[in-house]
Amino acid sequence: MIIFLLCIMLAALPCAGCAQAADDVWILFVNAKKGDAALISANGKFYLVDTGREENADALVSTLKEYGVDEIEGLFLTHSHNDHTGGLKAVTEAFTIKAAYRAEFAEANKKGQAKLDKKLGKVGLESTILSAGDRISLGGDAYAEVLAPTELNEDDDNDNSLVLMLHANGHRALLTGDMQFKEERTLLRRNADVSADILKVGNHGNPDATLEEFANAVGAGIAVISTDTSADTDSANARVIAALGEAQVFVTENDPIGVMIGMGKDISAGYASIANNY
């Protein structure tokens, strides 16, 4: 029975080169080592959340191409740190980017320019600014809802992370960037609806993120941690995993490609290379 159920789950997962139904939505949390990059496929179009580190950029581009990407409808940069933006140049050289998004509140340089605006400008892209409450249509009934940031945090740009709730086929996936305790508490204080089926765990599962109270409010059955624990020994932290309760936890380093989440009629989850070999 266990083998039979596993086969059903793997059969439901999207894979590189496989044809997908037009209304299928999936997220590939790429193994970006000690970085973040997530590819979203929605209604035949692709969206990218963050670009990982520069040293892993070629591998990221290769993975995106394997999954059929030739154009990116929307690029979302959660914040300015290099483990989320390092692959920007390589991605923009490899693919046409139709729109680039950043949060309303973002860390600025000494000249008062948002660091993300400068990085995007260097590759010929202009920022579309997103505020809490904004919605970006992903086609069909799918859309990304902006939950945060709602205020500027001058201490750490992690807590200015663009936080998105992906809605598709009645399912919800919370994408948190490197959100830490401060931004989590702000969302809880504002009574934001953070409940989700899938949680991308904030800040690589480090112990300065994922309050137990926040994890309980999310209540996700599936959690994904993007990290390389050999390079970041505090990541995928035991306290964080305990706070996630009974959620099924996937860690990107455990698969050469990453973690695949299907958000079609039903939710499916598993390691991407297993789905490709099924």
Image (cartoon, rainbow, N blue to C red):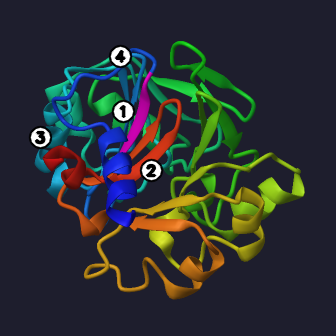
Name the quadrant of the N terminus: bottom left
The disc, 1 or 3, on the residue closer to the chain's N-terminal end is 3
The quadrant holding residue 154 is bottom right
Vertical position of residue 247 compared to residue 74: above or below: below
Distance (Cα) linking label 2 and label 1: 10 Å
Q: Where residue 120 is drawn, which disc sits there?
A: 1
* Magenta residue span: 24-29
In front: 89, or 269? 269
Q: Residue at x 78, y 64 (%)?
A: 185
Q: Residues within 10 Å of mark 2 (few under 14, many from 20)?
A: many
Which residue type carries mark 4?
A: Gly
- Vertical placement of residue 147 versus 254, above or below: above
Please state which amino acid type lies under the numbered disc 1.
Answer: Leu
Residue to which mark 2 is pinned? 80
Ranked by sequence position, the earlier of labels 2 and 4 is 4
How crowded pointer 4 is (Cα within 10 Å; few <14, some 14-19, many 20+) is rated as few
Residue at image coords 69%, 45%:
148
Residue at disc 3, secondary structure: helix
Residue 250 coordinates in the image, percent (x, y): 41, 65
